[in-house]
Amino acid sequence: MAQLLSKSRRLRSTPFTPFVEAAGAKGYTVYNHMLLPTVFRTLEEDYRHLREAVQVWDVSGERQIEVVGPDAAKLIQWMTPRDLSQGIVGQCFYAPIIDERAGLINDPIVLKLAPDRFWLSIADSDVELWARALAIARGLDVNVFEAAVYPLAVQGPKAEALMTEVFGPVVQNIRFYRFAPLNFRGHTVNVARSGWSKQGGFEIYLSRASLAGALWKTLMRAGKTLDVHAGCPNLIERIESGLLSYGNDMTRANNPLECGFDRFCHHDRDFDFIGKSALQRVAKRGAKRRAMGLFIEGDALPPCLKPWPVKHEGKARGSVTSAAISPRFGCGVAIAMVDRDAWAPGTLVTVHVPNGDKRRAMVAPLPLGEEQAALTGFARGPVAGTSQPASASPVEGGEAKARQAA
Ligand code: THG
């Protein structure tokens, strides 16, 4: 198949697309019917650069579903098991949205703009339709629409330095998962300390599309000495960091407890939400599987386009949903949905890669860390780095040993 995605009105560009193109985007995916870049130089080069410098990401595909009106808070609380009653204006909440069976519909960040006005900063599914239908069916006094807002993420260890250069030291006062209205060229942009990496950074919510070029160029110019580069959510970094991708690592077939969202599920509190009794049932019996990390022996993994079977002692025990080669660990890394029988960290499993490979792998908690990698015996450590390569060699009975050590 030719590596080409035909563009049309259905596949929406963003106000940043011309600048993303000029910066050399080499690939895109489609996210909320919108272009989302996936790679600029190479996946590995983008990864190393993200962990050392600062990148500017066009994440406009994280659409903002605005919910506004007297019943806005009521509708949002009905959609999520996370208790939002104590939230204040200027706060962000990572909040799973579930259906009546407790299946995940989306995992947005909720921004509280006013007591009666919210943005759902959504992952890739049509939340606007769900929210509008709920509002109509329940006769809620609320307006639901996709706002013309285009988030731009600034991610990496030098993100704060770059943002200070552009917006002033005021950005340093923005705490994690808080946002503040700041001024850019006489226009208000909401700036949050958040983003889809664990390298630190901010997200700028731009609602004046005509300023996209100015914002992009200002960041690029101000970041020259910081080695700023265009970037995008990075597959390797987000697997290592344990950031689950909706549609890839979780779907409506998964409940939030399987995804490790326990701390965002308040099904034992005194408020009503869709899927509450279903979620309470899951909580009572316990999740049957869980999203876990894996270290996979060897290199050169194909992209995970279908779930790869995970076996333990010859039995099917789950599936890999995202995988990549990690320069940091010197082996494969993956996110997998793993059954209870095999989910204990340190469990040795076999991953059936579609090219016929049967790879040895070890279950590990997310985010993936050096300590767990050292237990595998096959994680060779950073190719050019400071950590010691893992030394233990895997032997029969290694599983029990690894489990103990974990
Ligand atoms: N930024 C914005 N919108 C988004 C995303 C984003 N919408 C879609 C998608 N990403 C939503 N998914 C996530 C998943 C994890 C996080 C953010 C968005 C995240 N998690 C932190 C963690 O796991 O450590 C903290 C969560 C918390 O403690 O509340 O940041 O990236 N605008």
Image (cartoon, rainbow, N blue to C red):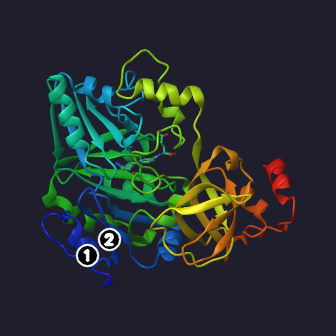
| Residue name at image x 28 percent, y 72 percent | 20
Q: In terms of secondary structure, where does tag 2 sit?
A: strand
Above or below, comparing residue 220 to residue 150 in the picture = below
Above or below, comparing residue 185 to residue 267 in the picture = below
Q: Are marks 1 and 2 in contact (CB under 8 Å)?
A: yes
Label 1, ligand 1: CB separation under 8 Å: no
Say which quarter of the image contains residue 34.
bottom left
Residue 269 located left or right of residue 241 = left
Q: How many marks?
A: 2
Mark seen at residue 118: none
| Residue name at image x 53 percent, y 71 percent | 48
> Which residue corresponds to mark 2?
28
| Residue name at image x 23 percent, y 65 percent | 16
> Which residue corresponds to mark 1?
5
Residue 25 located left or right of residue 395 = left
Of mark 1 and mark 2, the one earlier in the sequence is 1
Q: In terms of secondary structure, where does tag 1 sit?
A: loop
Q: Distance between the residues labelled 1 and 2?
A: 8 Å
Which amino acid type corresponds to the residue marked 2 in the rendered image?
Tyr
x, y (%) of residue 142? 15, 28
Say which quarter of the image contains residue 37.
bottom left
Above or below, comparing residue 113 to residue 53 in the picture = above
| Residue name at image x 26 percent, y 78 percent | 22
